[in-house]
Image: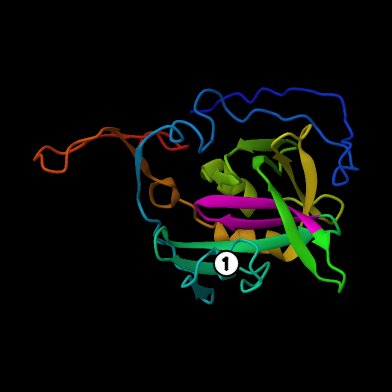
Amino acid sequence: MKRSIPLICFSLLQSILPISLAHEIGPETYGKGSELTLCKPYRHEKFITVKQTKLTEKFPGVKKFIIDEDWRTQGLDSSEFPLSVPLIIDHPISGTTIGVFDRNYNKTFRVASFFGRSEIKIMEQSIAQGRLGGRTATGTNDVMSLAILTDKGEYLVINGCDGVFPVNQKVAKTLANYPKSRGKAFIMISSLGSTGLRINQIGKKTIQAWKTVYKNWDSNSDSINKEVLLKSQKLNTKSKPELTEIESPDGPR
């Protein structure tokens, strides 16, 4: 079902924070009611079941990376992952997916991102310069919104939670055919407490990798499938717990 995308115009603002010397643009809402967000209705539920992701599409020549450590060595900002090339990620809990890592930083901030077939993850960190020239993360800002440019002279704003954004058919198609602006590629992100969407450059090879990551995207096999447990049942009862299936971004499953 097609939904209108209301556009809210704001005056251009400049933030007083060091990261935001560029102009910021007020957010545009993507959808109504059942927005693409992970905070609702899951955040306040006691139990959630999530089906593991599986790849039904074939990706010949793409390297497979097996997650066998925790966030200390294989986190989103880990140096173990090659940047701007498609990778098949075999995760011991969430399943198997394909995606591409991208990283952008200056002396004050770093934006680390993973554009996966089912989910997009973005982390914005504040950085301190060490005396010997190294960089140390001193804090993390919660990225709440992501804006991506379409090839129709508009942009989509996806509302997420804790830097995680679900992918649907429209998002996958947009990323697979992502246009460049003035020879460069940009997205916009908005963190908690910021004044709007802030522009962030993406590597040219990352944009090329999106064509592989999101090719032939299918909502039945590539969407995140979650069920919320409404009524808890005692373990010694024979009755099955009551589950309700949550509508995916592309409609009921």
Q: Quadrant of the C terminus?
A: top left
x, y percent for residue 65: 51, 73
Tag 1: residue type? Arg
Give yes or no for residue 123 being in the magenta stretch: yes
In this view, 234 is above or below 60: above
Q: Is residue 161 left or right of residue 139?
A: left
Q: Main secondary structure of the magenta part?
A: strand
Q: Is residue 192 left or right of residue 45?
A: right
Category of crowding for the residue at label 1, using alpha-carbon neighbours closer than 10 angstroms: few (below 14), some (14–19), many (at least 20)? few
Location of residue 86 by image quarter? bottom right
Asked if residue 27 can be seen in this view, the reply is: yes
x, y percent for residue 212: 58, 63
In this view, 84 is above or below 31: below
Give yes or no for residue 232 being in the magenta stretch: no
- Most extreme residue toward the front is 131
Q: Residue at x 86, y 59 (%)?
A: 107
In this view, 28 is above or below 73: above
Q: Is residue 3 left or right of residue 8?
A: left
Range of magenta residues: 109-127
Asked if residue 203 can be seen in this view, the reply is: no
Q: Residue at x 57, y 40 (%)?
A: 161
Q: Nearer the viewer, residue 136 or 218?
A: 136
Q: Residue at x 85, y 47 (%)?
A: 19
Residue behind mark 1? 72
Location of residue 94 by image quarter? bottom left
Disc 1, SS:
helix
x, y percent for residue 45: 39, 34
Q: Nearer the viewer, residue 176 or 104?
A: 104
